[in-house]
Amino acid sequence: MENNSEFHIAYLKSRISKLKENLELNSEQISAYQKVLSIAENSRNYEEYLQTLGEDADLFSLARSEQIDRYRSMVSLYEKFGLEENAEVFRKKLTISTTSKSYMELATNLPQTIALPLEKISTEKINQSMILLHLLFQINTYAKRDLRFAKALQFKSEFLKLKSIDSSFSFESFFINPYLLINPFTRSQIVSLKKNLESLLGESF
């Protein structure tokens, strides 16, 4: 291909080489860049290059591949940490990126996937569980029983708040992501803290 094509081909090769440093995170981009590179190397001139690219003459496939890799990685990351609400937001972004046919379509539809309520729920779950852990510690450290009892009642109230956000929450959840991320206690310590709480309130959790 003419018209200083060596610079364009050198750029594509350079990008592929860089992307291959992390195959797992860049698989979509590598495939997209390799396809464009193949067309560039096999085109006799710039006009043939554009003609072969067809609808992708603006190289939208490269931009889309970057979005797909990014959002796919974010879904995987949030799933790993048990932050399902955040993962769902990026699944929506991934779907939009995968199905978009143009820059305009991508720019128009992506903002619609910003699901602040979902992300807010995820944050509330973590914050609420931190309150519970703090209260459990206070219940077991205050000297006066009436203060421990007051904290136990507060724990029950906050526990019910968290249950309203995450109906599956239990003490066992402290050992499962996302709650495990902020739990500083061992299983035996949690069992002991729970026993003291239930003794104060005369009920089980």
Image (cartoon, grey):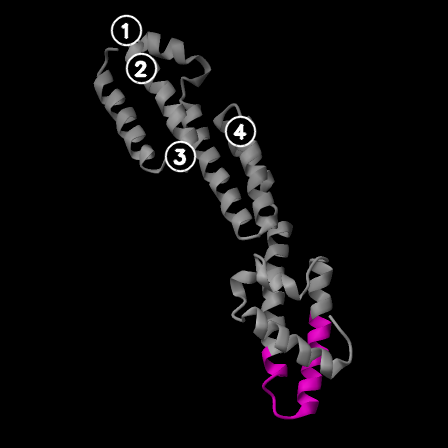
Q: Which residue is mark 4?
A: 98
Nearest to N terminus: mark 3 or mark 4:
3
| Lateral position of residue 204 relative to residue 173, left or right | right
Residue type at mark 4 is Thr
Instruction: State how far apart marks 3 and 4 are (Cα).
Output: 15 Å
Amino acid on which disc 3 is placed: Asn
Identify the mark nearer the N-term, 4 or 2: 2
Q: Which residue is mark 1?
A: 44
Foreground disc of the pair 3, 4: 3
Q: Which residues are magenta?
A: 137-158
Callout 3 environment at 10 Å: few (<14), some (14 to 19), or many (20+)? many
Q: CA distance from mark 3 to mark 2?
A: 21 Å
Q: Residues within 10 Å of mark 1 (few under 14, many from 20)?
A: few
Q: Which residue is mark 3?
A: 26
Residue 179 lies, with reference to residue 79, above or below; the image says: below
Which corner quadrant of the image does residue 27 belong to? top left
Report the quarter where the C terminus lies.
Answer: bottom right
Give residue 99's quadrant in the image: top right
Q: Residue furthest right?
A: 203
